[in-house]
Amino acid sequence: MKSMKQLEKHGLDFEKIKAYQVLCLPENIETASTEEELIDTAHNANFCKLLREAGIKCANSYDLGLETVELERRGIELWFGVTYILDKLAIPVLTAVISSLLTLELQKKQNFSTKSIEGENNNKIHIELRIIEGNNIYRSINYDGNFEDFQKIINDIKNVNPKDNNN
């Protein structure tokens, strides 16, 4: 089972991390060798902002003192980073925020053609979710696919029992 210890190489302060329910971290936080290699996305920053507005104690790379490059992708795909869920009580709000984001993006994209020349649906989301229990990753979801199928996964995540939280 993976551990949160892998984040130590970027100098993250675990005492500071414990104050948050959710961490929205760069998409390559687990694979980058140095802080200079870290890539954050504009979608990830917006996601963190929306979680805060919904009442979730959420931190992004800036809050944790990481110097990252922010990448703004302008295509029709949504690119998030690695989201660590430290408090299972945040799951219902987190899933509601993701669902709202997907709905908004689908509505915006309906004004444009979302079909490629081959007729493929290009409404894609790229996200990694880590549900943390104690200091270990309890459940991990890496998703690169269409919005509709991800919505089904989000509905499944809602079934994680918040009462099992060890925080």
Image (cartoon, grey):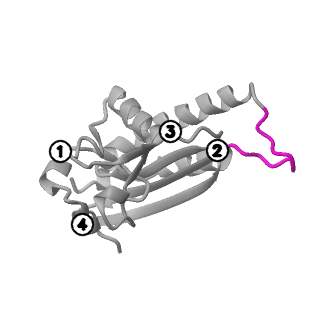
What residue appears at the point 51 percent right and 60 percent down from the top-left corner? Answer: 142
Query: In the displayed structure, does residue 34 sit left or right of residue 119?
Result: left
User: According to the image, label 1 marks what residue?
Assistant: 19
Q: CA distance from mark 1 to mark 2?
A: 31 Å
Residue 109 falls left or right of residue 118: left
Q: Are marks 4 and 2 in contact (CB under 8 Å)?
A: no
Q: Which residues are magenta?
A: 113-123
Q: Amino acid at mark 2?
A: Phe
Residue annotated with mark 4: 9
State how far apart marks 2 and 3 are (Cα).
10 Å
Specify whether residue 115 is painted magenta.
yes
Outermost residue, right direction?
118
**First in sequence: mark 2 or mark 3?**
3
Check disc 2 and report its element: helix, strand or loop.
helix
Q: Earlier in the sequence, mark 1 or mark 2?
A: 1
- Element class at badge 1: loop
Q: How far apart are labels 3 and 4 at the CA level?
A: 29 Å
Give the structural element (helix, strand or loop) at label 4. helix
Query: Viewer-nearest of labels 3 and 4?
Result: 4
- Asked if residue 76 lies left or right of residue 52, the reply is right
Look at label 3 and name its amino acid: Ile
Task: Give the answer, above or below, for where 127 lies relative to 136.
Answer: above
User: Residue 90: where, in percent of width, then height?
Assistant: 34, 42
Residue shown at 44% from the left, 50% from the top: 81
What residue appears at the point 79 percent right and 33 percent down from the top-left corner?
113
The reply to whether discs 3 and 1 touch (Cβ–Cβ < 8 Å) is: no
